[in-house]
Image (tube, rainbow, N blue to C red):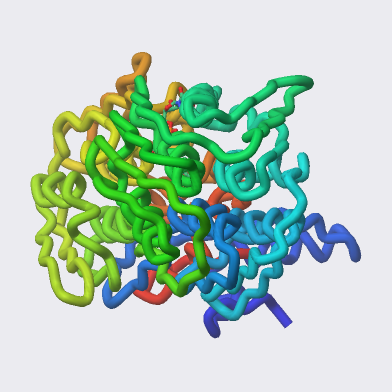
Amino acid sequence: MGIRWMGQALSSPFFPVCHKMAAKGDVCGSEVFSVQRLMIEGGTPLRGEIPVHGAKNSALPLLAAAVLCQGETVLHGCPQLSDVAAACRILTELGCRVRREGHSIFVDASSVSNPWVPDDLMREMRSSVVFLGSVAARLGEASLCFPGGCELGARPIDLHLFGLRALGMEIEERDRHIYARTGGRLTGARIRLRFPSVGATENILLAATLAQGETILENAAMEPEIVDLAGFLTACGARIRGAGTDTIVVEGVDRLHGCEYTVMPDRIEAATWLCGCAAAGGEILALGARADCLQSLLPLLERMGCRIRVMPEGVLLAAPARLAGCGQVVTSPYPGFPTDMQAVLMAAAATAEGESRFTETIFENRFRHVAQLEKMGARIQVDGMEARVEGVPLLHGAEVEATDLRGGAALAVAALGALGVTQITQLRHIDRGYESLERDFSAVGAKIVRI
Ligand code: EPZ
């Protein structure tokens, strides 16, 4: 029985390539080498509603915050992603009782006891460094290995350590490990970040909630995920003012209780859906998308010729027959244009009429998707931190590989509007940030299958 997806047999005319591959697999005998790939046949305009799930980059710090709570926390709207599963494994290792029911995660941190985040989990997910502040503040000590860099660049954590030390945490860096001790209770402080790091803001905010006295954090990150974290902590009894501005004030409390909370919608996933429709054509409603978190993207999509309507249920986008270029886009900390949206917008701009220019100011290595887009016929000149896109009438299908999470999503966006079939491999990158790209895009008519 041939492989079937969404009721469509791979032997159907849409999947000639998969059919051949499946046959080749049989020829290899019993051991078919299982390389998962997405097969996308472009050219079908998207139509319908596509759900936006809970934000990965909010669920992760919220799960770390649960360590601070002496009681049970319930988080609704947690996306089913490998990174979220890794965070749940860390919580269990720390001594929390964790269970998952669909998109809800129940964490009881009453008996958290172990201050050590296992190395293998740190290496699986570098953003686990956000556990440093909450574990040390709750247990008086914490130990984890250096998170190290990733596909996007070096990813230092000097700002995290600077802020936590300012709160009185003694941090030793030895053998690629971090050993932190609070020597009793942390003490509130005035801290000014040289750069509004999202992770450092989260780590400092988590540790400051249980410190003695007041903490003033200046040049703090203003991302919506920071506001979500402050909302959760406040629901647990923390006293926080100014989240979402560049100055956050925390009045330390003795203890935090659990709470029930719903994770905010994923603004990067919403951007992916909207850019996918801009590239493929058609009209979709990104269900649950919050326009206020997309305020730097929506005007660009309108400039490119898309019709945007903000509805109570989400954001509606109708694509033009052909996009216009988006002009100059410079990524910067919120409320500037988010670096996480750069790749998916570039993918849509690849077939726009005219030129689009992207300047990446956040990460030193965030143009790795360009070479893959060029395999599909895109014309992009990279010069240092700037990428100049000269729109072409149409891209064509190709065999490409995901280089990182958002770069991989960008390839799917480009493939939806391309002529022919595109194969995307290295799906582990994409699966870190999307529950099922193929399920969600298929729901609005895209011809996309995972084999
Ligand atoms: C968060 O990473 C997100 N990850 C990233 O999303 C996102 O791209 C980034 O914020 C920027 O918005 C999560 O929330 C899990 P930063 P984070 O600290 O916290 C430098 C995705 O696709 N820096 O704001 O690591 C750093 O090198 C991911 O979901 C220091 O120099 O971002 C980078 O150049 C990718 N020292 C810049 O700041 C530090 O101590 C931004 O980093 C910390 C950061």
Q: Quadrant of the C terminus?
A: bottom right
Q: Quadrant of the N terminus?
A: bottom right
* Spot occupied by residue 224 in the image (x, y as percentages of width and height): 30, 51
Instruction: Say whether residue 441 is visible.
Output: no
Q: Residue at x 53, y 40 (%)?
A: 404
Front residue of 218/451: it is 218
* Spot occupied by residue 294 in the image (x, y as percentages of width and height): 22, 52
User: In what quadrant does ligand 1 lie?
Assistant: top left
Q: Residue at x 56, y 41 (%)?
A: 133
Front residue of 416/76: it is 76
Q: In the rendered image of this protein, does residue 96 appear above or below residue 204?
A: below
365 lies left or right of 240: right
Q: Residue at x 24, y 70 (%)?
A: 284
What is the quadrant of residue 388 in the picture?
top left
* Spot occupied by residue 33 in the image (x, y as percentages of width and height): 80, 55
Front residue of 152/218: it is 218
Q: In the rendered image of this protein, does residue 226 appear above or below residue 12?
A: above
Q: Residue at x 48, y 35 (%)?
A: 187
